[in-house]
Amino acid sequence: AVLKHVQGKNSRFPATSSGRVTRARGKGVELHFLRVHGLKQSKAANNQDGGLSDLLIFLERKASSFTTGNQTRQIMIKKSHMVGDYVFIGAAKEDADEILKLNTFTFAGAQLEIVESTEDLAGQSKVTRSKEGQEVAAKFQSILSQRYIGGINKLLKLDALASDAGLVTMGMFENPDLALRSFKGLMVICDEFFKTEEDKKEAIESISLANNNIDDVSQVESVATTFPHLKHLDMSGNQIANMAALERWKGKFKSLVSLYMTGNPIDTTDPNYKTTLLQWFPKLQIINNLPLRTAEEIAEKEAASRPKPIPQSGPDFRDVNGIGENFLLSFFSAYDNDRQCLASRLYDDQSQFSLAIDTQSVRDKDAPAPMGWGSYIKVSRNLMRITHQNARVQRLFKGANVIHELWKGLPPTKHPNIKDDLSKWIMDCHPLPGLADPAGQNPMGVDGLVITVHGEFEEYDEKTKVVGKRSFSRTFVLGPGQPGKEPIRVVSDMLALRAFNALPNVFLAPNQAPGDGSHNTDTNSQHQAMVAELCKQTGMVPQYSEMCLAQVGWEFDKALVIFNEKKAGLPSEAFAVPPQ
């Protein structure tokens, strides 16, 4: 039960709760009201009626699929209206129970929040409330004001509500259902106190729900939705007997630092409940005034749980006669500006192209929301998702004309200039023997190159006029061109796309962080490491590698650019093995 009944110390309300109940005219049907949030954040919000009809159809269809029995029961929403960011809906209790199961489902790109509501308190705005409703709201507002302790405490005292003279005088404990609805009404008025979520977060950091005879938090679940950023919560002196009674708060209160549970039966029935609470609430440090972990320990645990980047030691670029380098310097500019010419010049009737998107890739949590995948999803050949052989074959595109037609349907792009922004690229190149001879003269095959490129590009969405970034990996297999055509051709081109996440700068010396002066005490060893890496990538002897780096102020990426520009004029003694 949520609250102590005023007429009996041992009397408790039932564990179940319901929303606002009203009778539909002429039909005798009791309607239970729910509050839905997320419509205005969805793509359907741009529809003629604000997306309301689409939302109602979605809720009825999805909820109907949950019904059991010999045949699916049709869920029906009897009433609906929009107030601000919320939609309030009324349905029979059994239908409302099914619709509640859709809480956190995604509708038109937005996550829905569906909770029980009271029509007279939540279903009407301040402007549309009846006179009676306005009077009730004003009294609730007065009661909450008296229970608020500001200053450094920032505490809202909602303890022992059954003993509050104001609530008792209003008759809010005449029956269990009314008492439950009254608490939800208090939460609605709490929301109306503040213009923004940030104002509410700043004003209230602590709430006391002590001594309310609560035996299941489902009865006060609205505290978690109204105050998701709460830091301190007092649940002492209630009737929580096990972790199942706290289940509805699992994964919520993500900023909760301290929780008080003394005087609940769970203290004796479950000796391990504190360990479980630490798992459910990621920031929780203190239970029953006992520190169990520090903020530093929590941060270390979070850091340890994050995916670790693969250690990088710089690209391994084993070019042959500058073929790979020249290809890369020209390819991405041509792809951005003239895809038709690029396809006809470097691709032939045997060339293959495929594209795969990864919507679950690791990305910076502080980065902007990723761009949509609508332009790519229909041609994506992600083999983890596309498992049928026919679909895999259909999404492998062969021939210059077919590849160009596909490229025409992809959004315009702009890749960084390789010479100017080398740190935004990671490129590997290796010789690849045994490719089919396009001239048909060598049955043992001919030599080619396999090139793997990781980077980023800007993308322009022609429908929304929005410019955003994506990260990509692209693997090319290059081979000799057909007689009478370009000297090289693209045998295979595999493009993988993911949400933008900046690459590590692999051109920094080991242990060197961008802009970090804390490692400068070991400058000599860093320079030696950079010399060794430049020797590895260019084939130059250490003396010339050091001269090249010193010339550009020990900026590795600039040293590579200078080397590629001056390579043809370097003497043979600059190389450990003379270039071919």
Image: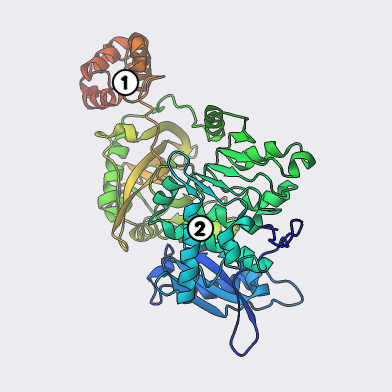
Residue at the spot 45% in from the left edge and 71% down from the top edge: 134
User: Which of the image's four quarters has the C terminus?
Assistant: top left
Q: Estimate how packed mark 2 is, as few (under 14), some (14 to 19) or many (20 or more) residues with alpha carbons within 10 Å.
A: some
- On the question of residue 495 being in view, the answer is no
User: Camera-side residue: 246 or 161?
Assistant: 161
Please, what is the three-letter code of the amino acid marked with disc 2?
Ile
User: Which of the image's four quarters has the N terminus?
Assistant: bottom right
Residue at the spot 54% in from the left edge and 34% down from the top edge: 302
The furthest residue to the right: 269
Q: Going from the N terminus, do you reach mark 2 or mark 1 first?
A: 2
Distance CA(mark 2)–CA(mark 1): 86 Å
Look at mark 1 in the image and give the residue it sits on.
579
Badge number at residue 307: none
User: Camera-side residue: 560 or 263?
Assistant: 263
**In the image, residue 366 lies at what x, y percent?**
41, 42
Badge number at residue 143: 2
- On the question of residue 563 being in view, the answer is yes
Total marks drawn?
2
Q: Are marks 2 and 1 in contact (CB under 8 Å)?
A: no
Among the 4 quarters of the image, the one containing residue 9: bottom right
